[in-house]
C-alpha cells in the first residue's frame, strides 16, 4: 500500500507519475494499492522576490542615469566586477520571453504563490484529475479504472515544516490520515510514502 504526496500543480511530470500509480492500482493485476493522495505545498517565492527587488533597482538605476546605486545595490543587480551577472541577467532572461516580475504578479504566475496557495492549487487539481478516472467506462476505456476515482485526496501542510518547532505545527488532514495508516501498517503489509 502506498500514500502519494505530490505538489501536482508545480510541474507536469507529477500528473504522469500519479496516473501511472493509480492505473497500477486498478483491477485484478494491480501492482500497488494507492490508499490516498496528499497535496503538498510548493512555492518559488524565495527565488521570485529577489527578482522583484532587482527590477526595482534596475528601474531606479535607469531613471537616474545609471549612476545612483550604492555599491551593494550595484553588485546585487549587476554582480561584482570580478563576477558579472547578478540579478540583471535573470531579468534579461525573463525579458527575452516577454515577462517581468511585475507581469508575473499581474498574471498570477505560480512562481509568485506562497506554499499554502501551491498546496491548495495542487489539492484542487488532484480532485479534478482523480475524478476523470470515473469517466473511464463511458469513455470506452477499461471500466475497472473507474474505481480509481474513489481514491481519497487530502489537503497537506500549508507551510514548510523545516525550521519550525514540530510541536507547534497543526497537522493537516493528509498528515492525520497518513499517521492513521502508518500505525495500522505491519511488516507483512507495509505502508510506503511516495513523495513526488
Image (tube, rainbow, N blue to C red):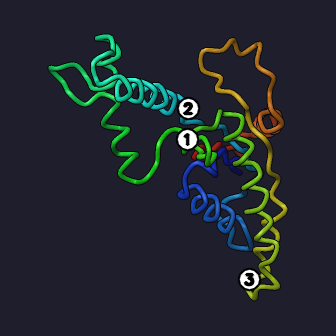
Q: Residue at x 60, y 43 (%)?
A: 195
Q: Nearer the viewer, mark 3 or mark 1?
A: 1
Label 3, secondary structure: give it. Answer: loop
Depth check: 28 or 180 in front?
Answer: 180
Question: Label 3: which residue?
Answer: 142
| 10 Å crowding of disc 3: few (<14), some (14-19), many (20+) | few
* Residue 182 picture quarter: top right
Proximity of marks 2 and 1: CB atoms separated by less than 8 Å:
yes
Of the numbered discs 2 and 3, the one sitting upstream in the chain is 2
* Tag 1 secondary structure: helix
How packed is label 2: few (under 14 Cα within 10 Å), some, or many (20 or more)? some
9 sits left or right of 60 in the view: right
Q: Which residue is mark 1?
A: 111
**Looking at the picture, how far across and down is residue 133, in whole percent?**
76, 71
* Residue 84: percent from left, percent from top: 20, 27
Q: CA distance from mark 3 to mark 1?
A: 38 Å
- The picture places residue 77, in percent across and down from the top left corner, at 33, 25
Inter-mark Cα distance, 2 to 1:
6 Å
Q: Which residue is mark 2?
A: 45
Query: 138 and 181: which one is in front?
Result: 138
Front-lying residue, 114 or 3? 114
Residue at 73 percent of width and 63 percent of height? 129
Residue at 30% from the left image edge and 27% from the top image edge: 86
Which of discs 2 and 3 lies nearer the camera? The answer is: 2
- Of all residues, the one furthest to the bottom in this rendering is 140
Q: Is residue 184 left or right of residue 40?
A: right
Mark 3 touches mark 1? (CB < 8 Å): no
- For marks 2 and 1, the one nearer the N-term is 2
Residue 153 has which mark? none
State the separation of the CA atoms marked 2 and 3. 42 Å
Q: Determine whether, in the image, residue 67 is placed left or right of residue 126.
A: left
Amino acid at each position: 500500500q502506498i500514500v502519494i504526496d505530490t505538489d501536482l500543480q508545480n510541474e507536469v511530470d507529477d500528473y504522469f507519475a500519479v496516473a501511472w500509480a493509480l492505473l497500477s492500482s486498478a483491477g485484478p493485476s494491480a501492482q500497488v494499492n494507492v490508499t490516498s493522495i496528499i497535496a503538498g505545498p510548493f512555492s518559488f517565492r524565495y527565488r521570485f522576490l529577489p527578482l522583484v527587488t532587482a527590477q526595482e533597482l534596475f528601474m531606479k538605476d535607469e531613471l537616474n542615469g545609471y549612476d545612483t546605486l550604492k555599491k551593494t545595490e550595484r553588485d546585487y543587480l549587476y554582480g561584482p566586477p570580478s563576477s558579472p551577472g547578478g540579478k540583471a541577467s535573470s531579468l534579461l532572461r525573463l525579458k527575452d520571453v516577454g515577462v517581468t516580475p511585475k507581469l508575473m504578479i499581474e498574471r498570477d504566475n505560480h512562481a509568485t504563490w506562497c506554499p499554502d496557495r501551491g498546496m491548495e492549487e495542487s489539492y484542487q487539481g488532484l480532485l479534478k484529475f482523480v475524478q476523470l478516472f470515473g469517466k473511464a467506462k463511458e469513455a470506452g476505456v477499461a471500466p475497472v479504472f473507474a474505481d480509481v476515482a474513489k481514491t481519497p485526496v487530502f489537503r497537506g501542510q500549508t507551510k514548510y515544516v523545516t525550521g519550525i518547532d514540530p510541536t507547534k505545527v497543526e497537522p493537516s488532514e493528509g498528515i492525520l490520515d497518513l499517521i492513521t495508516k502508518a500505525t495500522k501498517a505491519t511488516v507483512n503489509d507495509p505502508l510506503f510514502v511516495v513523495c513526488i
